[in-house]
Structure formats: structure tokens, C-alpha cells
Amino acid sequence: MLKDYRSLIEEYRKKNGLSMQEICGDYISHSSYSRFIKKNQTLSADKLIYMIDRLDLNFREVGLFDQVIFLTNEDKVRMARVLDSGDLQAMADLADEFSSVSKREYDTHGMMAIRIRLKIGGEIASQQVKKLYDYLSKVEQWDYKEMYLFTFIIDKVESSIIQMVVKRVYNRAADSLYLERNLNLTILLDEAHFEFLRRGEFEQAQQVLQQLSDLVINKSFQTVFGLYSISQALHQNLVQTNPENFNKIGRLYRNLIKVQSDFLAIRLKNRYDELKTIHDLTEIEW
């Protein structure tokens, strides 16, 4: 049976004989921890990572937390598939479904609904873009939510703005606490790298790819390493065009399907197909 974060954390806290004070330190209040464990109240990603670090887990145990990420991404796979289909009615239906289960405008399902509506386009998408611009301009210290929301409009801002945002967020977030596991910072870098590839700005893309590689230390985190692998493979195809690199793309796609990382596989295919039309790349039989 799949275990969630709270049951895993509580299980390993007790197994390792740690008190609430020892796992929370000075970073998480005891009341927040109790609400997280007893009432399943959401904790921010950085606080979850902080507790996981303090559990002093071995390689296999750490992998269990990545398995939770992997198996609870079913809705993201559904989103990726409906976006890939191009079926506008199916997109609208799924966006409405996600909105109906969303508790806040910018929670996980709320943001997925926004992403789908942006893809549908039209007046609704235009209004959503303006709303995102207005919101992000008012927040001085971006957290994971703001990083993710910025990726929704990254194709609509100037390259200099993307560079400024990446530098600002990376300098603040990429400390020892985040270095190997901050999935949201990884997503921001991954999206920025892809946008620079789309624009043919390979020097900026290389700089972001290096930042992304610095985050990928613990390869047991399948999602983080999968994003990096996709970015690296696409980058190599554009800057070093040769048959072997195209073969690597195909092998990576098949390997992602094999390990049931459908969300990442669809991401790779869509991104390659988009770059192919821009940069006249070789057709790949998926």
C-alpha cells in the first residue's frame, strides 16, 4: 500500500528514536508538525525536505519519498496526456474537474487548471496571463508557488527578465537545504533552459543547464534526475547535431516509458517535437 509523506516521516521518526523537537528543530513549529501528522495539513516543500534531511535516511529509504512523488503524480500525467491530445473540449473538462477539487486558487489542482486554460487560449487565457503578471509583480520573495507560476508565462517575457528571475531565485534558494531536492527550483531552471533552447540562445541555455546539473546530486530522486536528463539530451541535440544524440533521445523516451514515468516521457516527446519545428531537427519514431 502506498504511504504518504506524513506516515513515512512519523514512521522513521519513531524508528530512529527522534523527538518532535529533534525533527522540527527551530525551523518548524510543533503545532505545524502536529497538524501535518494528525490532520494532514499541507507543509511547504522546504519544510518537508528539512525533516527528511534530519531523519538521516539511507539510500533505499530516501527513494521511498521519491516513490510517493512518482505515484501521486497521476493527475499530472492526465494533464500531460490531454494537452498532448489537442482536444479542446477534453482540456476544458479536465480544467473544470481540477478547479472543482481545488481548495485554493494556486494550490496544485488550481495551478494545473490554470495551465490547461492557458493552453486552450482565447480571451480566458489572456485574462489569466494578466492576472499572473499582476500577482507575481506584487510578491517580493518568491516561494515554490511563485517559481511554478512564472513558468506558465515564461514564453511571454524577455530573455533578460528570465535571466534576472533565475539568478535571483537560484541565489536565494540553492543553498545546502535545497541543493539536491528542490523540485520546484529544478522545474524553474528546466523551463528556463527549454525557453532559451526555443529561442536559439544557447549560451544562456548552457548557463542554466550548469545550474540545473549542480542541483542533481542525489540520483535516487527520480523526478529531479528525469527533468535534468531530458534537458541535457535536448541541449546536446541542438548544439552537437549527430545521429547518436538522436538515438539517445529515442532510448531515453523508451526508458521513461519502461519505468512508467509517462509524465516525463510525454514531456520529452512534446519538447523535442516543438524544437524540431523551430530548428529543423530529425524526425524521431516514438
Image (cartoon, rainbow, N blue to C red):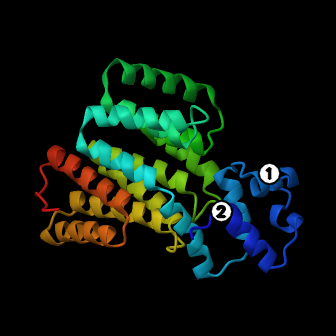
- Residue at 61% x, 67% y is 3
Disc number for residue 5: 2
- In the rendered image, which quarter contains the C terminus? bottom left
Which amino acid type is shown beneath numbered disc 2?
Answer: Tyr
In the image, residue 64 sits, relative to residue 69, either above or below, namely below
Q: Is residue 124 visible?
A: yes
In the image, residue 234 sits, relative to residue 121, either above or below, namely below
Q: Earlier in the sequence, mark 1 or mark 2?
A: 2
- In the rendered image, which quarter contains the N terminus? bottom right
CA neighbours of label 1 inside 10 A, class few (<14), some (14 to 19), many (20+): few
CB under 8 Å between discs 1 and 2:
no
Of 149 and 16, nearer the camera is 16
Disc number for residue 35: 1
Q: Does residue 72 appear left or right of residue 230 in this picture?
A: right
Q: Is residue 200 visible?
A: no
Q: Does residue 196 appear left or right of residue 1 in this picture?
A: left
Of 218 and 212, nearer the camera is 218
CA neighbours of label 2 inside 10 A, class few (<14), some (14 to 19), many (20+): some
- Residue at 86% x, 51% y is 31
Question: Residue 221: x and y, percent?
Answer: 51, 69
- Residue at 31% x, 49% y is 81
Question: Residue 94: x and y, percent?
Answer: 39, 38
Which amino acid type is shown beneath numbered disc 1?
Answer: Arg
Question: Residue 213: x and y, percent?
Answer: 46, 64
Q: CA distance from mark 1 to mark 2?
A: 13 Å
Q: For the residue labelled by badge 1, is the local secondary structure a helix, a strand or a loop?
A: helix
Q: For the residue labelled by badge 2, is the local secondary structure a helix, a strand or a loop?
A: helix
